Image (spheres, rainbow, N blue to C red):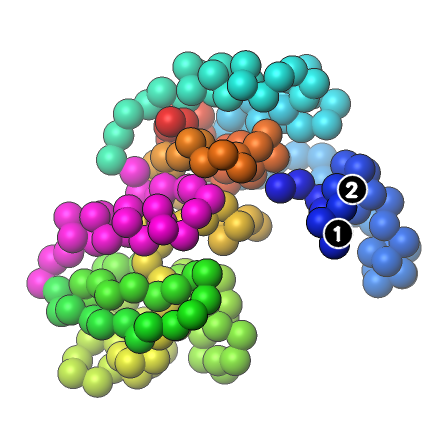
Amino acid sequence: NGHTWLDSKLDDDRIEHSRLFHRICDGNRITLTECKRSDATLYDWYCSISRGGFRYDRPFDEVLQEAKTFFKNEFFPDYVLCIDHDLRKKINRTHNEILKNDAVWVEAPKLKCPNQPQDFWLYRGQVLQAHTYSSKKMKNGLFYEVTDYDEENVYFGPLVVNKSWVAKTCRLTHCLTISSSQGRTLHGKIKIVTCHRRFTMKHLYICLSRATAAENVWVV
């Protein structure tokens, strides 16, 4: 929902000119001048909806319709981005069922948290996201590819993790919430689900800027 503090909306430049950030970094600042993530077509599009872009002050409904018209590449996505966790789990369940291969069933514990784990099929080549702040083995938010498994453990290359711990801590990556995708480059095809009532211009910007090429984006 943009920059907020204690439910109060902040101006777009409040983070940029934050005295706290200035103090933390001793006044040092780095200005990025070249995009290394996206192709020029995609980069120009999402820059047009950022502050200073020619679409920035347009009505959001109009901008969203333009995005749906421009990014209409229908495909089976490698990643889906959405806002709510219920939809995340539903899409993950569907895609996990489709993509499973020589898989074993893993039952997740019932936890009371927004980003709940879910039951899933575990298979070699599968990519999972760690959701932990306490593990010395896995880092929160990072992706890990399953290379093998047995009755008790899951192997992520040289990293060995107990299967029950994976069930509790790891999340499927077929569908990610927008907040979980921030700071990440998503290589592959991305479908962006915009139907949530809280979806805003800033959500659209975040989603588009995760991808590497305009042809890899589908906005619905």
Residue 6, visible in the rendered structure:
yes
Q: Residue at x 38, y 27 (%)?
A: 220
Residue 60 in percent (x, y) is at 58, 21
Which of pointers 1 and 2 lies earlier in the amino acid sequence?
1
Category of crowding for the residue at label 1, using alpha-carbon neighbours closer than 10 angstroms: few (below 14), some (14–19), many (at least 20): few
Residue 156 in percent (x, y) is at 32, 71
Q: Is residue 112 left or right of residue 164?
A: right
Instruction: Kindly indicate the quadrant of the structure image that contains residue 75.
Output: top left
Residue 212 in percent (x, y) is at 46, 35
| Residue 85 part of the magenta segment | yes
The residue closer to the viewer here, 8 or 63, is 8
| Residue 190 part of the magenta segment | no
Give the extent of the magenta segment: 77-102
Callout 1 touching callout 2 (CB < 8 Å): yes
| Rendered position, 38 above or below 5 | above
| Rendered position, 34 above or below 83 | above
Read off the residue under disc 2.
10
Read off the residue under disc 1.
5
